Image (tube, rainbow, N blue to C red):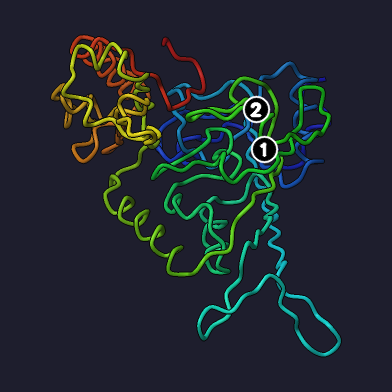
Amino acid sequence: MFLESKPENLQENISLAKHTTFRIGGPARYFCAVQNEEELISAIRWAKDNSLPFFILGGGSNLLVSDDGYEGLIIKMQNVNLKMPNDNVKLRGNHVALRNVELRGNHVALRNVKCKIECDAGVSFGKIIMEASKQGYSGAEWGFGIPGTIGGAICGNAGRLGQAMAQIVESVTVLDENLNIKTLSKSECEFGYRESRFKKTHEIILSATLVFAKKEQAEIDEVLNQAKEVVKHSPPYPSAGCIFKNYNVKGDSDKLLKNYPELKERVRGGRAERGLSQAQLGGKLGAGFLIDQCDLAGRQIGGAKVWEGHANYIVNVGGAKAEDVLALIALVKKSVKEKWGIELEDEVRYLGNFKL
């Protein structure tokens, strides 16, 4: 019975290295690219009927695949519908009428204008950013240069420059374990720092509605330029992005700050209010800084190296194996624990057989 009624585009023994930004990983026993909900459900049913595990793959960032590959079905999301309505222009007879406008000096400006963008999970995050920016809509330009799909960005609540996906998500449509389609509100997504409910459930993100705001092009370009500066300082080698989450500081009572009070000035991202410092209010300490202070930048095992430009990146300088990366991750965690007394949390996800 095995392989009967298999999806038409099912492939076997496909290398996963070329489907991840790390360029690391063995073969998937089965691989299937899907472009719509029907193909997705068909692929999942086939996997379940044949008692195969399956994994949903987007852009392949923030992912480390085992050297042995994956003994199941990889389903690659290639649903890429993107709808960007223009809510500000309306035809009236033979002329165009603009709504939500006001005069500012000698020019017309749009005010309080929101734009809802509907996008499939397989749409490139970068495409959404550029399409919205071109039309003067702000909300995700901070993410310029972040690889991957919108589904992955939502799942990991991707963020940068003090902003994150949770700020622009209105709703997310998912496929649940019973293959039922349902729509979740932002609050139901349970967003946290690089977290969402989708990392804990077996729900599959199908699409999302994002909300952007109309802004002056100069404001949008300012944030875009900040993001582009970050990209300029990204590693020139394949990587999964940041390997570890930044350390979450829990205010002045945090044990790390008690032991190392000089670190207070490096805390960022707290809510600066009522005259309190960011350290007092909580925030983040960069994992890259904590690793760098352990003299690990440049440390290399096999083809994997802790990048000198930002120690929270492990890069593939050529021919790296997953076991090389895993050995470096273990070394970093051990060193940080010994020096700082804290446990770093993984931001990268693992696929396949690992001895963690």
Q: In the rendered image of this protein, does residue 136 appear above or below residue 19?
A: below
Image marks 1 and 2: residues in contact by CB distance under 8 Å: yes
Left or right of residue 192: residue 80 = right
* Residue 348 in which image quadrant: top left
Question: What residue lies at 43% left-to-right and 26% top-to-bottom?
Answer: 347
**Amino acid under disc 1:** Cys
Residue furthest to the front in view is 274
Name the quadrant of the C terminus: top left
Q: Earlier in the sequence, mark 1 or mark 2?
A: 1
Residue furthest to the left in view is 295
How far from the left and from the top, in percent, is residue 255? Answer: 28, 11
Residue 107 numbered mark, or none: none
CA distance for labels 1 and 2 = 7 Å
Residue furthest to the right in view is 93
- Mark 2, other Cα within 10 Å: few <14 / some 14–19 / many ≥20: many
Q: Nearer the viewer, residue 154 or 20?
A: 154
How far from the left and from the top, in percent, is residue 337? Answer: 25, 11
Name the quadrant of the N terminus: top right
* Residue 90 in which image quadrant: bottom right
Q: In the rendered image of this protein, does residue 224 appear above or below residue 79?
A: below
**What residue sits right under mark 1 in the picture?**
32
Left or right of residue 172: residue 214 = left
Residue 73 numbered mark, or none: 2
- Mark 1, other Cα within 10 Å: few <14 / some 14–19 / many ≥20: many
Name the secondary structure under disc 1.
strand
Question: What residue lies at 44% left-to-right and 30% top-to-bottom?
Answer: 25
